[in-house]
Amino acid sequence: MPGSILANNMSTTFAEIVEDVKQLSPAEQEALHDLIRKFLIEARRSEIRENSEAGLKEYRDDKLESFSNVDDLMNSLSDD
């Protein structure tokens, strides 16, 4: 792999990373693709877990609202 991908250089720009990735072999690009996909999946799982925990806390603290009609629900959502 090119050194700038492996280096812990916070000033590396996105464009530089893209250029470095272009220099990788197809197998390395595929491996990187798989890693990025796994990172994105894990990030989404963390987001879902955080939202779930926040929702459960609101439920336990009796802070959830219920609505009997869709218009009230939609108004509530637009107020956030």
Image (cartoon, helix red, strand yellow):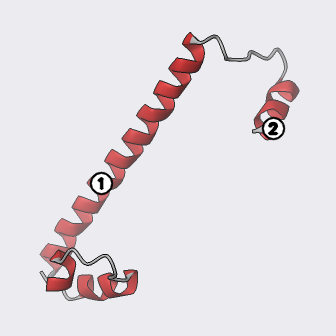
* Up/down of 7 relative to 30, above or below: below
Q: Quadrant of residue 17?
A: bottom left
Question: Quick one: quadrant of the C terminus?
Answer: top right
Q: Position of residue 19 (x, y in %)?
A: 30, 89
Which residue appears at 52% of the width and 27% of the height?
54
Circle 2 is placed at which residue position? 79
Q: How many residues crowd mark 2 within 10 Å: few (<14), some (14–19), many (20+)?
A: few
* Up/down of 8 relative to 15, above or below: above
Question: Quick one: quadrant of the N terminus?
Answer: bottom left
Q: Quadrant of residue 72?
A: top right
Q: Is residue 24 visible?
A: no
Q: Nearer the viewer, mark 1 or mark 2?
A: 2
N-term mark: 1 or 2: 1
Residue 10, disc: none
Circle 1 is placed at which residue position? 39
Decide if residue 8 is on the left or right side of residue 77: left
Of residues 32 and 2, which is closer to you in this image? 2
Decide if residue 47 is on the left or right side of residue 75: left
Are circles 1 and 2 on residues that touch, CB within 8 Å? no
Q: Position of residue 24 (x, y in %)?
A: 17, 83
Q: Position of residue 2 (x, y in %)?
A: 15, 85
Of residues 76 and 32, which is closer to you in this image? 76
Of residues 70 and 60, which is closer to you in this image? 60
Q: Position of residue 39 (x, y in %)?
A: 29, 54
Residue type at the position of mark 2: Asp
Q: Quadrant of residue 66?
A: top right
